[in-house]
Amino acid sequence: MKAPSHLNALRAFEASARHQSFSAAAAELNVTPAAVGQLVRSLEEWLGMPLFVRSTSGRARLVATEAALRALPEIRAGFDKLSLGLERLKESTASGVLTVTVSPAFAAKWLLPRFERFQATCPDTDVRLETSLKLVDFVAQRVDIGVRYGTGTWQGVTAEKLMEEEIYPVCSPEFLRRNQPLHEPNDLGRVTLIHDLSMDGHAGFPTWDQWLQEVGVTGVATSRGMKINNSAAVLQAAIEGRGVALARSVMAHDDLAAGRLVRLFPEIRFVSELAYYVVYRPECASLPRLIAFRDWLRHEAAGS
């Protein structure tokens, strides 16, 4: 029997196994579910064996057979090598486009204010910036490099620590004048607290409860106040005098330097157990434009 179109059939099989669905694989590959199913069946016919069974527990989904599961890691590694080969072909003729993923708040408060310096350093490299709070699939979404906030343990990517950060209360100068005295943490009990819910429920993400417990303060009502699910908006609310925010030093650095915010109780140090990491696919580590961007991030972080 003649082999099917290997590349398309293998791509359909890999995407279907990853999503456990022909429909989801079709959406990723920009074809119809019927086309994905036909490609997978052609591969099964050529191999003379099934690659999927239908799950009967809960909602219907595709489950790869044991033989298919054994083959998947090498198939994925093969696609990664193909992608890297194409990247290197593009590198031989032009710098190309660098796809970068960061959170919306990190982009607004740290990356974009500094980005002009990268453009001056690497004027031939165009950057496609993807902002998302979700953990993106670097292979499926063709992401080159990103900055993630967490403990540094993510599957499928190399993670290098970029910046640690302190956590401390901040407010606007005007708010501080209106609400004197704010000399010690106990004084926070009579002002509005602004809560950052951008990573609500994430283990290790600093909260007002944790900060107050760390500094030995009780009796401050943390169930009330303003709650916002974006770190940049949390700082903006503080800048506008809406209350006292629990700031992350990386995010608040520029606002403090410009005098838009004031750090309260500077003698108290509370270092977050989470940090910022540069993350990228290990097979892309030698791409010149990735190296240039990673080195630039390190340089900027050292000066922050």
Image: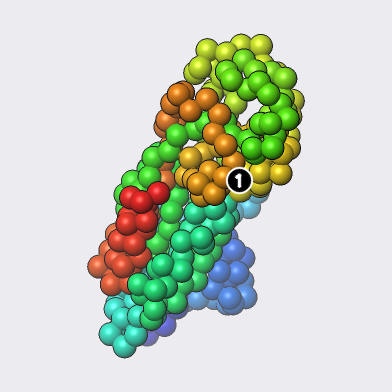
> Which residue is drawn at the image coordinates 65% and 39% (left, top)?
172
> Which residue is drawn at the image coordinates 59% and 63% (left, top)?
24
> Which residue is drawn at the image coordinates 36% and 75% (left, top)?
122
- Give residue 123's position: percent from left, percent from top: 39, 78
Pick out the residue farthest to the front: 177
Quadrant placement of the N terminus: bottom left
Q: Which colour scheme is used?
A: rainbow
Height in image: 1 above or below 187? Answer: below
Q: Which of 43 and 131 is in front in this view?
A: 131
Q: Which of 140 and 220 is in front in this view?
A: 220
Height in image: 37 above or below 248? Answer: below
- Give residue 139's position: percent from left, percent from top: 42, 64
Q: Does residue 93 appear to the left or right of 196 in the view shown?
A: left
Q: Does residue 29 appear to the left or right of 95 in the view shown?
A: right
Pick out the residue farthest to the left: 286
- Give residue 302's position: percent from left, percent from top: 33, 50
Residue flagged by tag 1: what amino acid is it? Answer: Arg
Q: Name the residue under label 1.
A: 260
Q: Nearer the viewer, residue 212 or 134?
A: 212
Mark 1 neighbour density, 10 Å: few (under 14) some (14–19) many (20 or more) = some
Tell me, yes or no, if residue 258 can be seen here: yes
Quarter where residue 38 is shown: bottom right
Q: Nearer the viewer, residue 202 or 149?
A: 149
> Which residue is drawn at the image coordinates 63% and 52% (left, top)?
60
The mark total stands at: 1
Local SS, label 1: loop
Tell me, yes or no, if residue 71 can be seen here: no
- Give residue 189's position: percent from left, percent from top: 69, 18
Height in image: 171 above or below 276? Answer: above
